[in-house]
Image (tube, rainbow, N blue to C red):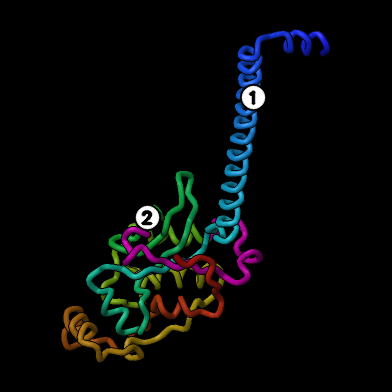
């Protein structure tokens, strides 16, 4: 240290000043690199924490979950008016080998990729509900039975007349029957066509189109709204 000090002191002032300046720049450079690394690490861990918090706030979709949205079909407004609800279509969530699907009664009954199903809804808004005691009831064996029961209707025509039969089937009827037939659970009390609000112009026009002057007022039906309001379900996702 004394040798360095003496040699440095022996140097001309200009050279000594240049050496000290270079050392100062190097020190600042190292400090800047360390500071940058800390900033990057802080940003990374903050991002990970943020994503974890977001994921923890959105429960993972499970097989058997029931999903609702506002359809953009020609009959949607009539269904909304008759039931006093904005939800006019629904289906069941199933995990398949290549992604998440919605098992639904459209034309025909089919499995639709979840992302496509969501895009079809008004404003891409949807709500997912689940049995309150799903962790006890919806075991892997039961989920398998739900799927097997549902596949009996796969490819069947959509029921435009809302008849209580298995020849053709509509969206809420499909979900209701799957749960009823496998678990003996009734997701909402059955109604009759006469129980709905049939006074709205949209409803009157659709009833005239479908039935003419022979409206089956006593026909049993189950609406998306009845299932949506079932006391047996809880909301797990709403977007």
Up-down: is 155 above or below 125? above
Left or right of 140 on screen, residue 189: left
Position in image of residue 153 (x %, y %): 38, 62
Up-down: is 223 above or below 104? below
Up-down: is 26 above or below 136? above
Q: Nearer the viewer, residue 179 or 63?
A: 63
| Residue, disc 1 | 24
Q: Residues within 10 Å of mark 1 (few under 14, many from 20)?
A: few
Is disc 1 in contact with disc 2, using a CB cutoff of under 8 Å? no
Residue 12 placement: quadrant: top right
Distance, label 1 to label 2, CA atoms, is: 65 Å
Q: Is residue 151 magenta?
A: no
In terms of secondary structure, where does tag 2 sit? strand
Residue at 62 percent across and 44 percent down: it is: 45
Position in image of residue 81 (x %, y %): 30, 83
Up-down: is 184 above or below 197? above
Residue at 60 percent across and 40 percent down: it is: 39
Left or right of 5 on screen, residue 116: left
Magenta span of residues? 117-145
| Residue, disc 2 | 112
């Amino acid at each position: 240290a004394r040798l360095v000090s003496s040699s440095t002191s022996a140097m001309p002032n200009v050279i000594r000043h240049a050496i000290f300046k270079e050392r100062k720049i190097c020190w600042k450079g190292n400090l800047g690199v360390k500071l940058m690394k800390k900033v990057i690490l802080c940003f990374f861990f903050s991002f990970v924490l943020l994503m974890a918090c977001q994921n923890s706030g959105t429960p993972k979709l499970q097989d058997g979950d029931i999903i609702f949205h506002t359809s953009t079909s020609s009959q949607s407004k009539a269904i909304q008016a008759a039931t006093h609800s904005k939800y006019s279509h629904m289906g069941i969530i199933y995990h398949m080998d290549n992604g998440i699907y919605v098992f639904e009664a459209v034309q025909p009954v089919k499995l639709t990729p979840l992302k496509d199903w969501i895009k079809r809804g008004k404003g891409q808004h949807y709500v997912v509900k689940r049995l309150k005691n799903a962790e006890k009831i919806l075991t892997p064996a039961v989920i398998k039975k739900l799927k097997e029961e549902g596949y009996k209707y796969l490819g069947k025509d959509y029921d435009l007349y809302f008849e209580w039969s298995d020849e053709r089937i509509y969206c809420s009827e499909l979900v209701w029957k799957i749960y009823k037939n496998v678990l003996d659970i009734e997701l909402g009390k059955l109604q009759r066509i006469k129980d709905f609000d049939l006074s709205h112009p949209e409803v009157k026009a659709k009833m005239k189109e479908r039935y003419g002057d022979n409206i089956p007022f006593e026909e049993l039906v189950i609406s998306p709204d009845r299932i949506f309001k079932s006391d047996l379900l809880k909301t797990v996702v709403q977007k």
